Image: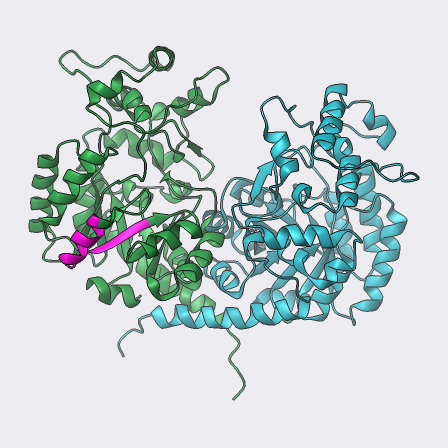
Chain colours: A green, B cyan
Amino acid sequence: MRTPICDRFGIEYPIVAFTPSEHVAAAVSRAGGLGVLGCVRFNDADELDRVLDWMDETTDGRPYGVDIVMPNKVPTEGTAADLSSYIPEEHRAFVERTLTELGVPELPAGDDGAAGVLGWLHSVARAHVEVALSHRISLVANALGSPPQDVIAAAHDRGVQVAALAGRATHARAHVEGGVDIVVAQGYEAGGHTGEIASMVLLPEVVDTVGSDAAVLAAGGIGSGRQIAAALALGAQGVWMGSYWLATTEYLQTHANSATMQQALVAATSADTVRTRIYSGKPARLLRTRWTDAWAQPGAPAPLPMPLQNILVGEAHRRIHASHDPSVVAMPVGQIVGRMNSVRSVAEIMAELVSGFDEAADRVQAARVQPAR
Amino acid sequence: MRTPICDRFGIEYPIVAFTPSEHVAAAVSRAGGLGVLGCVRFNDADELDRVLDWMDETTDGRPYGVDIVMPNKVPTEGTAADLSSYIPEEHRAFVERTLTELGVPELPAGDDGAAGVLGWLHSVARAHVEVALSHRISLVANALGSPPQDVIAAAHDRGVQVAALAGRATHARAHVEGGVDIVVAQGYEAGGHTGEIASMVLLPEVVDTVGSDAAVLAAGGIGSGRQIAAALALGAQGVWMGSYWLATTEYLQTHANSATMQQALVAATSADTVRTRIYSGKPARLLRTRWTDAWAQPGAPAPLPMPLQNILVGEAHRRIHASHDPSVVAMPVGQIVGRMNSVRSVAEIMAELVSGFDEAADRVQAARVQPAR
């Protein structure tokens, strides 16, 4: 399968992989797609720098990108300690009580918890951009809104393309007017931060809205060659896949506690997700577990705004990971989780996507009634 | 465009139109698709009988079908008067107060309101089946669950195919085990009663689940040839379109008050729908208006179970229709409403679907890298 976006990046297949794992990102780039490393997990820009050094070395000269979260509007800014002071005691008590009720143990002695994700702060995101642009990247993507003008300019100065996610056609229009090169149309079915309009409807709307001003990638619900063919039929130039790479052997190399998470994902059906604000403060689709259920009970507090909610649950997430209990996993994932039924290598998945696309393309072509000659 | 389901029904295009309008259904059948008349609006089986006589005469010998709502489990059964006694006073007061606040006038003198939709009752649905099977129909569909075994048997005895809607793969499996011939996989983006899994994810799941036991039609988010091509890429044999026919000149012939409704639909974007239980008691996607907003306010009562909720709002719906105010329209519609931007004829839409499919099929084919010879 081949579309104009392949030439734009010098890649073999129009498959972009968004992943928090450098191991997955590098494997996708080596297999002919474009690996995009999510940077929000790096609270320390120096750590990102070291990981991008590794990416430069392990991608065999193939292109790769980064995803940096630059929200349009952040309510509060500051260090983890500063921000913590904004969190109501009621919320802390609810989290503590819920973890106890769910049987999630305390952290081992010596582990003093975590700061939560600070990558959603402007100051941290800016440091990420600076570090990333000093590496051999081909794409900077922003998951929340249009990137700031100076970031777009700095990227373009270095020949780096800029992408932004859109859950509505109006957002896509704003992106291209701001100079974004690639719009990722992300449907309701997607994992993580997502809107309410499903891919089948959203994608043609975004394609028609941006016209020739930008290339469009389809995100949300993609995990097979059939779905890539559907995305291309709807007008996309390629796909942006996130969730599907969580069930890979490469992902397991990134986080020591990923095996429990993968066990939960492999067991889940497409009905086992929930769109909720409990992860970050903005609506995001998560695996439905006893943890998300607890937040949906009557009497549970309303989630806090970004970035406070993730700081609130930062330590809870560490305790949950350390518990090795699949029934309480706190993990963003899309409805495609229902098709993530085994843990496989990136290369195997890529080969399946390509052959599945060919079969689907042939099926569509078979339904095409050729005009009489 | 042509798939095996065309031969099954003797139709030209794999496009099935679900519509409450006999004028739309007949026009779709005449234009080479399969018109399916929704029967839930007929509280009186004799009226359905007369309308199907008209369908027999005006479809030029082309096939058509009916959709009869046969829920698996109905909490209460009885006449409109019996059922009314189950409705709490709090709910009646809320409806009355809301209509006043929204500026919806009383019904004119002499109009004593309506019973609400009784087609959701078993007794009424049974009468519909009996009437329909005495006509020249090719399909009986059920929007809520598998049809009863004796209905399937009676349909098959007369060479009539049976279809059922499914919002999850497990429902689809149950349908084919019950003897259903066609599964309509209806995604989250659809109008009316709908589940939570979007078409992009649901459709391949249903296709793989039913295998060769049934044909699958894609419902939810379909309003263009691109979307039909996407549905076929995902494994469907055709599409089941509902909302899109509401913005047709033929629909206007059915209901005297449709012009206001069409005005509201044409103005709406894909973000202007809401999935709520206020229409029937089960989750259904409606156009978002001041009426749906009122039910989403804090303090609004929880909707009643089916069939009580529709009986509760039956008179409100009549008052709303009579008000000719597009800002309070109470209308099931899918997210594709964002693309329903003018009122056109069924024939014009059908022609556009066919040409749009061809273009999309060609686009997918262009991305297919032919194997080296």
Residue lying furthest bottom: A373
In what quadrant of the picture does the N terminus of chain A appear? Answer: bottom left
A216 sits left or right of B319 in the view: left
Q: Residue at x 74, y 69 (%)?
A: B62
Residue B132 among magenta residues: no
A183 sits left or right of A125 in the view: right
Q: Residue at x 83, y 58 (%)?
A: B52
Q: Position of residue B205 (x, y in %)?
A: 47, 48
Q: Is residue A338 above or below residue B163?
A: above
Residue A41: in sight, yes or no? no
Residue A152 among magenta residues: yes
Q: Nearer the viewer, residue A147 or B349?
A: A147
Q: Is residue B356 above or below residue A349?
A: below
Residue B33: in sight, yes or no? yes
Q: Is residue A187 above or below residue A14?
A: above
Q: Position of residue A185 (x, y in %)?
A: 38, 52
Q: Nearer the viewer, residue B105 or A371?
A: B105
Q: Residue at x 69, y 28 (%)?
A: B305
Q: Position of residue B339 (x, y in %)?
A: 55, 57
B356 sits left or right of A357 in the view: right
Location of residue A179 by image quarter: bottom left
Q: Position of residue B286 (x, y in %)?
A: 62, 42
How many marks can you see? 0
Residue range in magenta is: A150-164
